[in-house]
Structure formats: structure tokens, C-alpha cells
Image (cartoon, rainbow, N blue to C red):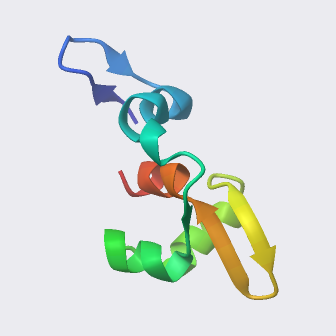
Amino acid sequence: MAADNNNGQEYKTKAEIIAHHFAHLRGQVITPYAAEKKYGIHRSNFIKWARAGHIKILTQEGRLIELDVADVAYCAY
């Protein structure tokens, strides 16, 4: 995935895209259910992406999972 920064330069890595578009969200918490409501992507996808290491899990207690909003926003981007 590549995003144009309006100067002709493309951000190519996950870290570059998050730093440019979603840095203000880093460390904030969102549940898969809330992410589904916000981004329109089924919560099971966010859970799968978290378990695969694409989204940082901030806390997990039993069935409650809290994800990093910046990573969620990137995956929904």
C-alpha cells in the first residue's frame, strides 16, 4: 500500500503511513466492536489481524481485547 503525501513522495511502509496519517491515534484504545462500528469492517477481521500481528493488542483479558487505534486505522485505511 502506498499513499501520496501531496508532494509527489509516497509513503510505502506501515510505519511511514502511520507516522503521517495516524500518529495522533497511537496508544489510544479501541475494541473490535467499536472498530467495526467506526470503520464498517467486521470485528472478526480486526481480531484476526491482531492475532496475526498486524494490529497491536494493548490489553487482553478473557474475551475482552483492546487494540491500538493507529494500527486499526491503518488496516482500515
Q: Give the quadrant of residue 56.
A: bottom right
Query: Does residue 13 lie above or below 77 as drawn?
Result: above
Residue 76 in picture, x, y percent from top left? 39, 58
Looking at the image, can residue 40 be seen?
no
Closer to the camera, 33 or 12?
33
Query: Does residue 62 lie above or below 20 as drawn?
Result: below
Please give the name of the residue rendered at 50% of the width and 49% of the height, measured from the top-left corner. 70
Looking at the image, can residue 12 be seen?
yes
Residue 55 in picture, x, y percent from top left? 62, 55
**Which residue is the extreme one toward the bottom?**
63
On the rendered structure, is 60 left or right of 43? Answer: right
On the rendered structure, is 50 left or right of 20? Answer: right
What is the quadrant of the N terminus in the image? Answer: top left
Please give the name of the residue rendered at 39% of the width and 73% of the height, measured from the top-left corner. 41
Residue 9 in picture, x, y percent from top left? 29, 12
Q: Give the quadrant of residue 47.
A: bottom right
Q: Give the quadrant of residue 57.
A: bottom right
Residue 73 in picture, x, y percent from top left? 42, 54
Please give the name of the residue rendered at 47% of the width and 30% of the height, measured from the top-left corner. 19
How many numbered callouts? 0
Closer to the camera, 52 or 5?
5
**Which residue is the extreme one toward the left?**
6
Query: Does residue 26 lie above or below 75 as drawn?
Result: above
